[in-house]
Amino acid sequence: MSTESLMSTAKVEQRGPLLGKLEQFSSDRESWDSKLECFVLFLLCNSIADIKKFCTLLTSIGMDTYTLLRN
């Protein structure tokens, strides 16, 4: 899916500050299982809608991992 089509279907909502922080994934610092556990907790704390969970994951994994998944 292109960036343009993603942007055209996305709803922009004003929200308050998010609870917690998602660090970019680094296999040197953490396991994938640990990253997913923290990710799920972040989603729960911030009541992230189902439709936004995948995009939230993709934007939190870091450019190296994103590029690996994309290719």
Image (spheres, rainbow, N blue to C red):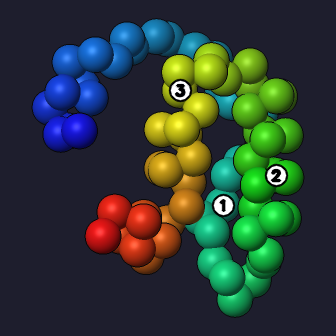
Q: Residues within 10 Å of mark 3 (few under 14, many from 20)?
A: few
- The amino acid type found where label 1 is placed reads Glu
The Cα atoms of the two marked residues, 1 and 3, are separated by 18 Å
- Indicate the position of residue 69 as horizontal and vertical percent values: 42, 65
Asked if residue 20 is positioned above or below residue 29 in the image, the reply reads above
Q: Determine whether 18 is above or below 55 in the image.
A: above
Classify mark 2: helix, strand or loop.
helix
User: Which one is earlier in the sequence, the residue at label 2 or at label 3?
Assistant: 2
Q: Please tell me whether residue 27 is drawn above or below residue 35 in the rendered image.
A: below
Look at discs 1 and 2 and give the one toward the viewer.
2
Which residue carries the number 1 mark? 23
Residue 53 percent location from the top left of the image: 59, 32
Q: Secondary structure at mark 1?
A: loop
Are the residues tagged 1 and 2 within 8 Å (C-beta)? yes
Which class describes the residues within 10 Å of circle 2: few (<14), some (14-19), or many (20+)?
A: some
Q: Earlier in the sequence, mark 1 or mark 3?
A: 1
Residue 32 falls in image quadrant: bottom right
Q: Which residue is mark 2?
A: 38
User: Which amino acid type corresponds to the residue marked 2 in the rendered image?
Assistant: Cys
Could one spot residue 63 in this view of the protein? no
Circles 2, 3 touching at the beta carbon (< 8 Å): no
Can residue 60 be seen here? yes
- Alpha-carbon neighbours of circle 1 within 10 Å: few (<14), some, or many (≥20)? few
Residue at the disc numbered 3: 52
Q: Residue at x 69, y 30 (%)?
A: 18
Where is residue 67 drawn, in percent x and y? 35, 70
Pick the residue in front: 50 or 56. 50
Report x, y in % for residue 4.
14, 31
Left or right: residue 12 versus residue 45 is left
